[in-house]
Amino acid sequence: MRRLPPLHALQVFEVAARAGSYAQAGLELGLTHGAVSRQIAALETWLGQRLFVRVGRRMVATPAARVFAEEISLSFDRLTAAAEACGRPQAPRVLRVSAPATFAMRWLIPRLDDFHAVRPGTEVRVTTTTTLQDALRGGFDLAIRRGPEPWPQHRAVPFLTETDTLVASAALLQDKPLATLRDLDGHILLGTETRPGDWSDWLTVAAVTLPGGVRRRVFDHFFVTLQALEDGAGLGIGPFPVLDRMVTAGRLVAPFPDIRVGRAAYFALTPFDADKSPALTALIDCLVAEGVRPGLTIPR
């Protein structure tokens, strides 16, 4: 007969060590601060050693406790996977993903086939937001947002960095070539209200000052700007690798690929109280793997 430590105390301890505080663990588990403290004290008594030490006003996991928590987390993951396999394998697993509209259309959805190859029994339902700063309301298993932001109620896993550069349609540049940066003032600049600093940041990096009379058109959302770019209505600033397939397909051109502006990373966010299922873990792993895939650079 196995001599197991108290399983509920193990669950509370794993969450507290991962979340970094008793208070955050209580929020995730629906327990009071005192209940979390009592469960961890019971586990410390069973083990015969301290798992947390006080640093200022916070209780911080010891180095040994952090290693212990990682092992427990792996064990819980295996237990969840075993239960899922033993349960109803015929029941479809649905993951609800919230993502910015352009990112979902141009980067996420084209890559979901790779995830379905790994998890054929899992359906991913994508709902879109109009801005990267939309509130993280309920109704999703995973949200994709660009940082840096404080997300105190969510686990945040960075998986993709973004770089901006100038883009245009090939037809437009054939009619009005951009041989040098001096040719910019002969074009219309397309901007987006939800990405207000794109042009100013790029022009600063390019060390270009445009004349005051340069023509501009501003749209409310980037997917509208993107359509105007494809239609040859002007020049724009586009994010990569979100638009890498559009350039590879010849739908857009990046005439000055070496002039680029680094942006914050995209994060996969999961609520602390979300079901940490093998399917959800596999989706996050897939996002991370796609984010580091070689060749995601601005095409010339």
Image (cartoon, rainbow, N blue to C red):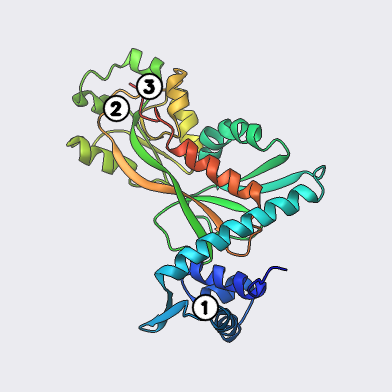
Q: What element carries label 2?
A: loop
Q: Name the residue under label 1.
A: 23
Q: Is mark 3 on a helix, strand or loop?
A: loop
Answer left or right for 4 relative to 264.
right
Q: Which of marks 3 and 1 is nearer the N terminus?
A: 1
Q: Which of marks 2 and 1 is nearer the N terminus?
A: 1
Query: Is there any visible trace of residue 128 in the rendered image?
Result: no
**Which of the labelled discs sits on residue 253, or is there none?**
3
Q: Nearer the viewer, residue 211 or 274?
A: 274
Compared with residue 50, is residue 223 higher up or lower down, i.e. above or below?
A: above
Q: Are marks 2 and 3 in contact (CB under 8 Å)?
A: no
Q: Do the residues labelled 3 and 1 touch (CB within 8 Å)?
A: no
Compared with residue 31, is residue 83 higher up or lower down, i.e. above or below?
A: above
Answer left or right for 97 relative to 287.
right
Q: Position of residue 116 (x, y in %)?
A: 65, 34
Instruction: Residue at 46%, 29% (x, y): give it.
Output: 228
Pointer 1: residues within 10 angstroms few (<14), some, or many (20+)?
Answer: some
Q: Mark 2 points at which residue?
A: 257
Residue type at mark 3 is Val
